[in-house]
Amino acid sequence: MIFYEYPPCSTCKKARQHLESKGVSFEAINLKADPPSVDALKLMLERSGYPLKRFFNTSGQSYKALGLKDRFEALSEEEALTLLSEDGMLIKRPILIHQDTVILGYKQEDYDTLLETIE
């Protein structure tokens, strides 16, 4: 199981605590220090079923600084994935990956549903 997080983020902290309380072992990756590659993001996008925009932290400072609100629709998928791979702070967090399952953000119910399938 892979857990992409930004350690100071309160939502990431809640998600991490939830996984730890369930005794789940996972590889934690700091999104800011080590953002996923374009290829890894493509795979996440395919497996998640989420629209591309869902991968963006639309309330974050990086998103606003780049003016993506006004120009997101004009980006190609490749351009959008490249932006994400270059700045982990653009990425919606946390991301939990287990085999073919990708969960963006943290909702306890979603985590519990996934954990029930691997117990």
Image (cartoon, grey):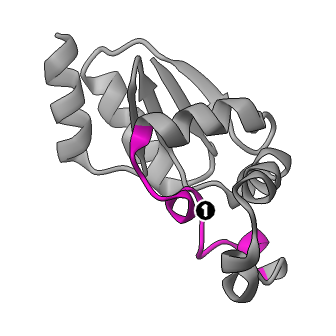
Who is closer to the viewer here, 9 or 103? 103
Who is closer to the viewer here, 118 or 7? 118
Q: Residue 34 in magenta?
A: no
Residue at 55 percent across and 65 percent down: it is 53
Residue 11 picture location, percent across and down: 45, 54
Query: Where is 114 relative to 66, above or below?
Result: above
- If the image is split into quadrants, where does the C terminus sit? top left
- If the image is split into quadrants, where does the N terminus sit? top left
Query: Where is 1 relative to 15, above or below?
Result: above
Q: Is residue 59 visible?
A: yes
Residue at 58 percent across and 24 percent down: it is 28
Residue 47 picture location, percent across and down: 44, 34
Q: Is residue 101 left or right of residue 72?
A: left
Q: Residue furthest bottom?
A: 70
**Picture quarter containing residue 39?**
top right
**Picture quarter containing residue 16?**
top left
Residue at 69 percent across and 41 percent down: it is 31
Q: Residue 63 in magenta?
A: yes
Q: Is residue 112 left or right of residue 41?
A: left
Q: Which amino acid does label 1 sit on?
A: Phe
The stretch in magenta equals: 48-64
Question: Which residue is the site of mark 1?
Answer: 56
Mark 1: give few (<14), some (14-19) or many (20+) Cα within 10 Å.
many
Residue 93 picture location, percent across and down: 54, 51
Who is closer to the viewer here, 87 or 13? 87
| SS of the residue under disc 1 | loop
